[in-house]
């Protein structure tokens, strides 16, 4: 049987190891997807730093921001989750977390199905007693079987969409959902002034989402200037605030208020994941403004928030984590519609699929030398 190469990690801090696993047979309602590009996500970095709050089945394969091509499929797999036809050669993305569609949250609160009680993770059921297996996208292929796990979702990309662009659909979707949550809460309107905390991949994508969804002004607070804040301005940030040049919260608060003028921003969104972001960010806001937290989702560090200020400033505070099944189509559509309006591919630094390349991709992402480290198992697919 043919073999598939996968990258695995033995635990936090361990180096990547390329292993081989058997190439699976593809039954009637399944597909084997060749990975063209897979991003290094902040979640991957948290896991490799040992921040994940629950036990993990080491060793396993990371990576979930996938753009790929169906190379084999069963005859009963005819369409994606949104009803678009699928065929061998179709360009697709698959999310890492797929709601089951049957549990309490999925049935009663579909708008919160991202809190599914029995979520599906692709590839965990290939028959291996333990990893490595075709779980994550830092591999040559991923595998999905909708009969074994009916909650599995596949989303077709436009036929002419570069796979590198498709690999941004999952993180962009998280930003779109965060703004939509603010809209539903009455905290984001067309023309609002928005401050984005964080200039990593989510922060950059949040700038694009804010612009596409009607923000009047967008300011980004982050670091370093090169390459991140430079790119933030290319994506449409009117101004940037460098936290390395202004190392104290007081200085940054004064600078943001100087830029936005008046009484403060209408909406602040934390995409940084830094424990100190909340107390600082609410001081960027005008009274009655809205704070959206989408960067704090692990127990990495203590979070000390001046909670009385939330009351005193009459703020709306929202948490936004990941996405629901219907949200993913919005991310794909925005990338397609706005593919020429933003320098999407400039976000990505490409790395080869070998142990050294993967190690460098992770190290550079952790050191903020890149905006979006992206692993490319098959370079010919992303040209």
Image: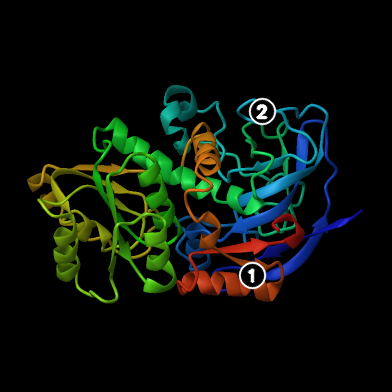
| Residue 157 percent across, percent down from the top left | 64, 40
| Residue 345 percent across, percent down from the top left | 56, 58
Which of the 4 image quadrants contains residue 56?
A: bottom right
Count of labels in the image: 2
Crowd band around label 1 with a 10 angstrom C-alpha radius: few (<14), some (14–19), many (20+) = many
Q: Which residue is mark 1?
A: 358
97 relative to 200 in the view: left or right: right
Q: Nearer the viewer, residue 17 or 372?
A: 372
| Residue 193 percent across, percent down from the top left | 23, 47
Q: CA distance from mark 1 to mark 2?
A: 33 Å
User: What secondary structure is found at the residue carrying circle 1?
Assistant: helix
Q: Nearer the viewer, residue 113 or 209?
A: 209
Q: Nearer the viewer, residue 160 or 49?
A: 160
Q: Which residue is mark 2?
A: 84
Residue farthest along the top direction in this orientation: 108
Asked if residue 323 shows in the view, the reply is yes
Of label 1 and label 2, which has the lower sequence position? 2
Viewer-side label of 1, 2: 2
């Amino acid at each position: 049987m043919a073999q598939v190469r996968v990258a695995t990690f033995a635990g936090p801090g361990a180096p990547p190891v390329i292993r081989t696993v058997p190439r699976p047979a593809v039954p009637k309602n399944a597909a084997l997807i060749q990975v063209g590009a897979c991003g290094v996500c902040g979640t991957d970095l948290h896991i490799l730093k040992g921040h994940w709050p629950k036990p993990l089945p080491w060793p396993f394969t990371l990576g979930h921001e996938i753009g790929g091509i169906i190379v084999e499929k069963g005859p009963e797999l005819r369409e994606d989750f949104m009803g678009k036809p699928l065929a061998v050669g179709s360009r697709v993305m698959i999310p890492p977390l797929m709601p089951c569609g049957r549990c309490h949250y999925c049935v009663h609160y579909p708008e919160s199905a991202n809190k599914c009680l029995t979520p599906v993770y692709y590839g965990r059921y290939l028959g291996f007693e333990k990893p490595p297996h075709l779980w994550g996208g830092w591999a040559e292929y991923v595998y999905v079987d909708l009969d074994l796990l009916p909650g599995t979702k596949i989303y077709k990309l436009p036929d002419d969409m570069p796979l590198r662009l498709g690999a941004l659909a999952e993180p962009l979707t998280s930003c779109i959902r965060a703004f939509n949550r603010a809209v539903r809460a009455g905290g984001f309107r067309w023309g609002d002034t928005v401050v984005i905390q964080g200039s990593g991949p989510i922060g950059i994508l949040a700038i694009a989402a804010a612009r596409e969804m009607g923000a009047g002004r967008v300011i980004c607070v982050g670091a370093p200037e090169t390459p991140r804040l430079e790119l933030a301005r290319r994506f449409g940030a009117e101004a940037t605030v460098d936290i390395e040049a202004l190392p104290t919260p007081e200085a940054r608060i004064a600078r943001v208020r100087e830029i936005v003028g008046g009484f403060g921003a209408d909406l602040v969104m934390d995409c940084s994941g830094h424990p100190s972001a909340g107390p600082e960010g609410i001081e960027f806001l005008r009274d009655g403004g809205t704070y959206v937290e989408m960067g704090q989702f692990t127990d990495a560090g203590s979070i000390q928030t001046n909670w009385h200020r939330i009351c005193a400033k009459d703020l709306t505070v929202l948490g936004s984590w990941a996405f629901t099944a219907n949200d993913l189509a919005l991310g794909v559509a925005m990338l397609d519609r706005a593919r020429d309006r933003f320098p999407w591919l400039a976000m990505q630094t490409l790395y080869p699929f070998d142990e050294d390349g993967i190690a460098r991709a992770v190290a550079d992402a952790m050191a903020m030398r890149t905006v979006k480290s992206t692993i490319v198992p098959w370079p010919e697919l992303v040209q």
